[in-house]
Image (spheres, rainbow, N blue to C red):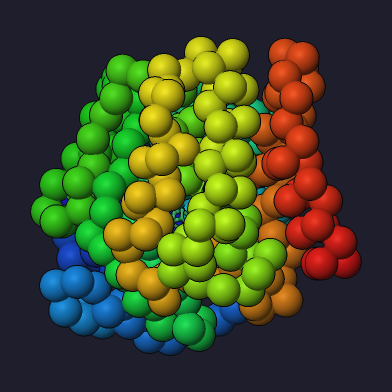
């Protein structure tokens, strides 16, 4: 049994905490207090009453810290690290985008950070109340830290694996996420991808991501734009991605981590990214 702290027990953090709590000692580090964690999973409900801390001063060292806040809440998440991180603690960052390590490098030595790509669609209806839509998967870089992270989930049906090519995994996931901007813009769930005009915009967003990702070293196939659209069309039409959920709730949005990053890194390589720049600007304006 490992001691695990989850910073940010929202849709992803709450889902993982509920599964991990079946075999480990899990503490939740939350911003908003709640008593009961209930996750409707594809295999039925998981209900737990874990320790929930809301004051970083109450945190004590654990074996693993899992950071699952939104990217824009990194500074708040980092406030927990002084209490949670001891000499042997490993820190996994479970967020979308391709900048997991850069984002937390100001707070921790980079070698202590395990970046994780998560593909587990989950929606939070209230603090501690979550619907996990699909069992999904997590990928982490190959190596001792990645193996130790995967071992935490050995008792769960979630597929957690290491990869020798994390760059490609992260950019492939970014391709999926950058296209999801259309949902936050239109305030329509995943089924909007069934419209041909919207699918054309999604393909353009992904094509820019592919061009920039390749320049960053990712091995991305030519048909990724088509695969992304096909995936959205095949999934539940009422699925709400986390960017869309943020806009619906009036929260900040991960625009920079999901679309802005393509524009920023594209500019560094001299690659034009007008469609991602446009949706990022429209979302910034919509959220301001
Ligand atoms: N939802 C999904 O389906 C998926 C999301 N992701 C990615 O995972 C990451 C997390 O997303 P998601 O789970 O949807 O986000 P949520 O908004 O559901 O959860 C984030 C949680 O972080 C908490 N939080 C914010 N600041 C702090 C702080 N200082 N201390 C402690 N807790 C804090 C929030 O608290 P409060 O309750 O007060 O808001 C909230 O509970 C994002 O990068 C997202 O892109 C990846 C795959 C799937
Ligand atoms: C698209 C999805 C649900 C895939 O896990 C996701 O990453 C998100 O909502 O942020």
Q: Is residue 74 above or below residue 45?
A: above
- The image quarter in which residue 233 lies: bottom left
Q: Does residue 125 appear anywhere in the picture?
A: yes
- What quarter of the picture does the C terminus occupy? bottom right
x then y, percent, for residue 198: 57, 57
Quarter of the picture for ligand 1?
Answer: bottom right
- Is 157 positioned to the left or the right of 110 in the image? left
Q: Position of residue 285 (x, y in %)?
A: 86, 61
**Above-or-below relation of 61 to 12:** above
Q: What residue is rendered at 39% in x and 30% in y?
A: 223
Image position, residue 120 (x, y; %): 34, 57
Image side of residue 229 versus residue 263, left or right: left
Identity of the residue drawn at 15% across and 56% down: 156
Q: Nearer the viewer, residue 187 or 40?
A: 187
> Residue shown at 27%/54% (left/top)?
136
Q: Position of residue 14 (x, y in %)?
A: 40, 68
């Amino acid at each position: 049994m490992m001691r695990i702290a989850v910073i940010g027990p929202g849709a992803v953090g709450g889902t993982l905490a509920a599964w991990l709590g079946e075999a480990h000692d899990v503490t939740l580090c939350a911003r908003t207090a709640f008593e009961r964690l209930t996750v409707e999973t594809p295999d039925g409900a998981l209900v737990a009453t874990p320790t929930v801390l809301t004051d970083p001063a109450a945190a004590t060292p654990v074996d693993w810290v899992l950071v699952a806040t939104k990217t824009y809440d990194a500074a708040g998440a980092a406030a927990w690290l002084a209490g949670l991180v001891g000499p042997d603690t490993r820190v996994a960052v479970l967020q979308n985008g391709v900048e997991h390590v850069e984002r937390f490098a100001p707070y921790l030595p980079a070698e202590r950070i395990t970046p994780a790509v998560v593909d587990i669609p989950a929606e939070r209806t209230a603090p501690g109340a979550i619907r996990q839509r699909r069992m999904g998967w997590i990928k982490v870089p190959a190596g001792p830290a990645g193996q130790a992270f995967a071992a935490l989930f050995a008792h769960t049906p979630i597929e957690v694996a290491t990869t020798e090519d994390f760059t490609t995994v992260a950019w492939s996931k970014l391709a999926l996420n950058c296209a999801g901007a259309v949902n936050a813009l239109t305030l329509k769930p995943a089924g909007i991808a069934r419209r041909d005009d919207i699918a054309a915009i999604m393909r353009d967003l992904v094509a820019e991501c592919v061009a920039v990702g390749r320049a960053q070293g990712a091995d991305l196939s030519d048909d990724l734009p088509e695969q992304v659209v096909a995936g959205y069309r095949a999934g539940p039409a009422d699925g709400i991605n986390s960017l869309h959920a943020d806009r619906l709730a009036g929260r900040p949005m991960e625009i920079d981590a999901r679309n802005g990053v393509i524009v920023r890194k594209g500019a560094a390589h001299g690659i034009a990214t007008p469609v991602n720049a446009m949706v990022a600007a429209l979302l910034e304006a919509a959220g301001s």
